[in-house]
Image (cartoon, coloured by chain):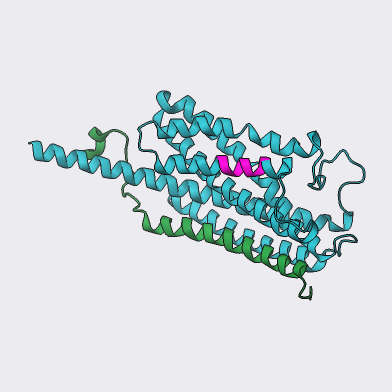
Amino acid sequence: MQRSRIFGSIGVVWFCLTLAAIAYATRLGLFLAPVDALQGNVFRIFFYHVPHSMLSLLFPYVNFIASLCYLYWRRRDPLKALNADAVAIASAEVTVVYASICLWTGMLWGRVEWGIWWTWDPRLTSMLLLWLLYVSYLMLRKLSSTGQTHTLAAVLSVFAAIDVPIVYMSIQWWRTQHPAPVFFSSDPNAGVDKSMYPAWFWNLGAWAMWGIFLVVFRYALERRRQASEQDAALQAIEASLEMAQ
Amino acid sequence: MFGSSMAARHLLYVYLSVWFIQGGYCAWVAWHWFHTRNPQPPVVADSATRDDI
């Protein structure tokens, strides 16, 4: 059996399991988890908001490591560098998707609970900055026409990763309007009731599985695109050599 | 089940928009996957060996 077929089969099985996990996690979050004593049903927004927020701070590190690998390999081993570059763009796009959802669902919750769509709170502002950094990373890759685009993007990605710990620590370092973290909080009054744990962990696991699926699928697409471009370049060289003869 | 208040509407918007954004991105990747030519046989780095394929 061809290796690509085995990977394709694993991908299909992973995709189906992920959809089942998302369906179950959504059912837990929407219908089975108890109603929050203070916020009521609007609290159920957090079952989607928090996993997307946490994952939008993890995928930038995949992008960061892949970019460092690209910078290291770009002269030493160009084929490995192409692999690393494909991982970098895949993880950057998934970061933008997850960060967009984090901002959007946070705004919808804020409008209900705070009465406003947006406030220049340190957590919200640093998250918006993170989103802008990765959007600019993707725009640089899309629009730049220099031969050094991939190197410039990798350097930008290294700087963008600096914002991730700032986003994470912003609610510890500064007094913010944003709620305290649900997990890993030093505040004994923070957190949620244990009866909500299944909904939290199922949603976190399901959306992590979905994110991994997206990164791998996008990586495979980028590798296919790179191979297609290489093939077209080789054909062009061969055609020019035939014309010269 | 959750009523028709702003809280209920926003809860609905969150769940629907997440599926829409995630599904839309996955569909975008899938569309490009099926519209990007898969070179057969696989590309080799050295064009000198291409004649051997």
Main secondary-structure element of the magenta-colored stretch: helix
Q: Nearer the viewer, residue A141 or A72?
A: A141
Q: Residue at x 80, y 46 (%)?
A: A177
Q: Residue at x 22, y 43 (%)?
A: A235
Residue A223 position in % (x across, y down): 42, 44
Please, which residue is most extreme toward the left here? A245
Q: Quadrant of the C terminus of chain A?
A: top left
Q: Is residue B25 magenta?
A: no
Please, which residue is most extreme toward the right here? A188
Q: Residue at x 41, y 34 (%)?
A: A149
Q: Nearer the viewer, residue A86 or A162?
A: A162
The answer to whether any part of residue A3 appears in the image is no
Q: Is residue A188 above or below residue A100?
A: above
Q: Nearer the viewer, residue A131 or A154?
A: A131
For the record, the magenta segment spans: A126-133
Q: Residue at x 92, y 42 (%)?
A: A188
The number of discs equals: 0
Q: Is residue B23 above or below residue A237?
A: below
The answer to whether any part of residue A210 appears in the image is yes
Could you tell whether A234 is left or right of A132 in the image? left
Residue A169 position by quadrant? top right
Residue A117 position in % (x across, y down): 70, 56
Could you tell whether A24 is left or right of A128 in the image? right
Residue A134 position by quadrant? top right
Q: Nearer the viewer, residue B45 or A109?
A: A109
Question: What is the display colour for chain A?
Answer: cyan
Of all chains in the rendering, the one displayed in green is B
Residue A225 position in % (x across, y down): 38, 47
Residue B23 position in % (x across, y down): 56, 61
